[in-house]
Image (cartoon, rainbow, N blue to C red):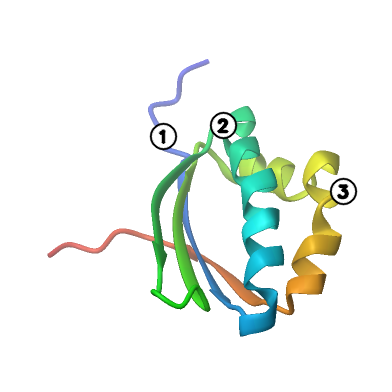
Amino acid sequence: METGVDLSQLYVMTARIPEAGVAQFNAYESCVLPLLADHGARLERRLRTEDGQHEVHVIWFPSGRAFDEYRNDPRRSQYAKLLVESGAVTTVMRMKDMPL
């Protein structure tokens, strides 16, 4: 049944990556970002500093459930070792659009 309610959610992920971990972080991202589409999500923006040590993603999910399913996807979990090895410190925040 169509409710007309927009259940979509917007998230921002920030990462601080030690210089020695940039390659592992990039390998992790190349494995897990393609999985977003399987959960109906879109990577809207991906920003990175020139040295590769800071990264920001703006990601749209069709619902909170889709976000949870992505986060718990066993295919994503199998690459978690790369993220740990990178030493990256990440933060994920649910955001909302604000009027300009």
Mark 1 → mark 2, Cα distance in angstroms: 22 Å
Residue at image position (17%, 62%) is 99
Q: Position of residue 62 (x, y in %)?
A: 50, 36
Q: Of the residues shown, which amino acid type is indicated by label 2?
A: Ala
Task: Tell which tag, 2 or 3, sits nearer the viewer.
Answer: 3
Q: Which residue is mark 2?
A: 37
Residue 6 left/right relative to 35: left
Query: Which is nearer the N-term, disc 1 or disc 2?
Result: 1
Image quadrant where one finds the C terminus: bottom left
Q: Which residue is mark 3?
A: 78
Mark 2 → mark 3, Cα distance in angstroms: 18 Å
Query: Which is nearer the N-term, disc 2 or disc 3?
Result: 2
Looking at the rendering, which quadrant does residue 88 occupy?
bottom right
Q: Of the residues shown, which amino acid type is indicated by label 1?
A: Val
Q: Which secondary structure, mark 1?
A: loop
Mark 1 → mark 3, Cα distance in angstroms: 34 Å
- Most extreme residue toward the left is 100
Q: Which mark is residue 5?
A: 1
Depth check, front residue: 65 or 52 = 52
- Most extreme residue toward the top is 1
Q: Position of residue 67 (x, y in %)?
A: 63, 46
Query: Which is nearer the N-term, disc 1 or disc 3?
Result: 1
Q: Of the residues shown, which amino acid type is indicated by label 3?
A: Gln
Residue at image position (77%, 46%) is 76
